[in-house]
Image (spheres, grey):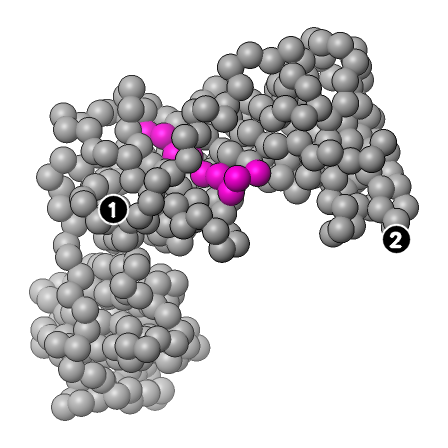
Amino acid sequence: MKILCDREKLREGLALANNVIPAKSPKPALSNVCLVATEGALELVGTDLEVALRYRIEDVKVAEPGTAVIPARVALDFVRDLTGETVTLETNGSNCTISSGSDSCELVTIDPDEFPVIAHFDQTGAVSLQGGTFTALVGRTAFAAAREQGRYAMHGVLTEIADGHLRMVATDGRRLAVASAPIDTPKVVPRPVIVPTKGTQLFCRVITDPLDQIQLSFSENQIGLKTRNAEVFARLLDGEFPRYQAVIPTESANSVEADSEMLLRKLRLVANVTGEEARAVRLSIKKGSLEIFGQSAGRGEARAAMEIDYKGKNAEIAFNPDYVIDGLKNCENGSVVLEFNEKTSPGKFRLGESYIYIVMPITIDT
């Protein structure tokens, strides 16, 4: 293999690949990136066996086609620090030389047969939508997925197509985020799948232009995403996702409408005094006004107030402020509606036309 490539494009490709490739692995081959040079293009492939990336760099001068599997992190670090505009990659026996001007690095390669085989994107039955739509849905939901050990299925984002919409759902048992967007429904609607959060994050990283069309493909054990330059695959999570629709309240006695940015600022103000041992703020609500109160033994207490539009009786409800803030940061517009029945019932935040965020309340001493 011998090619001449734009340095910045190569750096971008190696950086994306290193988001997938594990720094340490019981399988040494997985710490490498596979470079495949074909006519006019260089393909970079990386995987940790749970997620995989195939990234294509166009306009590459290929003097000799071929394949090289080289240490991913070392290659990225070296290419990143080069100053030349172009880079030459050339294999010689069991080594691959990366050079630019007077600077060069010789890396040891491994046998390409030791590198896992990564499938190509299958466009059969694929769903097409704008990249920005996909990243928006991930941004509104993935943060609510579980992180601590527990129910395996809750460590991912439920992704389903129903009623002409692509819907994503995530929960950690204490909060639930549901967002959807209209799409052209395929003839054969795929079954709902659970995509690991690492997979959704990688999908978003390869979407460079929100206006570009992307494609999603669903298979028995993985989901694939295709952009102009990249193909990304994520192994699906097994298990049964919680019946999220049963958690969403259908009727509420109390309804608060507020400026989302102002509520976000007030919550942050009060949350500053709450400690890790008592991460809670109390919302006292009456017609026209909302007061937020928080305290901790070692820091003190804080109050903040703001005007609201309220329908209901005077009420109080308490939440973990971090959970509410996470949702407000992804609010679709300048207004948020909080609906609830009692101080012990779930809070339903309407953060957009097709965006619902449920937060379980906290019981605190009054």
Name the chief secondary structure element in magenta. strand
The residues bearing labels 2 and 1 have C-alpha atoms spaced at a distance of 48 Å
Comparing 142 with 209, the one in front is 142
Tell me where the magenta segment starts and ends, as one range: 166-174
Percent position (x, y) of residue 292?
80, 30
Comparing 54 with 354, the one in front is 354
Q: Which residue is mark 2?
A: 298
**Placement of 217 over or under 277, stated as above or below:** above
Q: Amino acid at mark 1?
A: Ile
Query: Which residue is drawn at the image coordinates 60% and 13% (left, top)?
Result: 252
Q: Is residue 85 left or right of residue 319?
A: left
Secondary structure of the residue carrying tag 1 is strand
Q: Which residue is mark 1?
A: 223
Comparing 102 with 81, the one in front is 81
Residue 291 quadrant: top right
Comparing 227 with 270, the one in front is 270
Percent position (x, y) of residue 164?
28, 21
Percent position (x, y) of residue 236?
29, 49
| Quarter occupied by the N terminus | bottom left
Percent position (x, y) of residue 220?
18, 45
Secondary structure of the residue carrying tag 2 is loop
- The label on residue 52 is none
Q: Amino acid at mark 2?
A: Gly
| Quarter occupied by the C terminus | top right
Query: Which residue is drawn at the image coordinates 12% and 76% (left, top)?
Result: 113
Residue 106 quadrant: bottom left
Query: Which residue is drawn at the image coordinates 14% and 35% (left, top)?
Result: 125
Q: Is residue 152 left or right of residue 278?
A: left
Query: Which residue is drawn at the image coordinates 35% and 87% (left, top)?
Result: 103
Total marks in image:
2
Q: Earlier in the sequence, mark 2 or mark 1?
A: 1
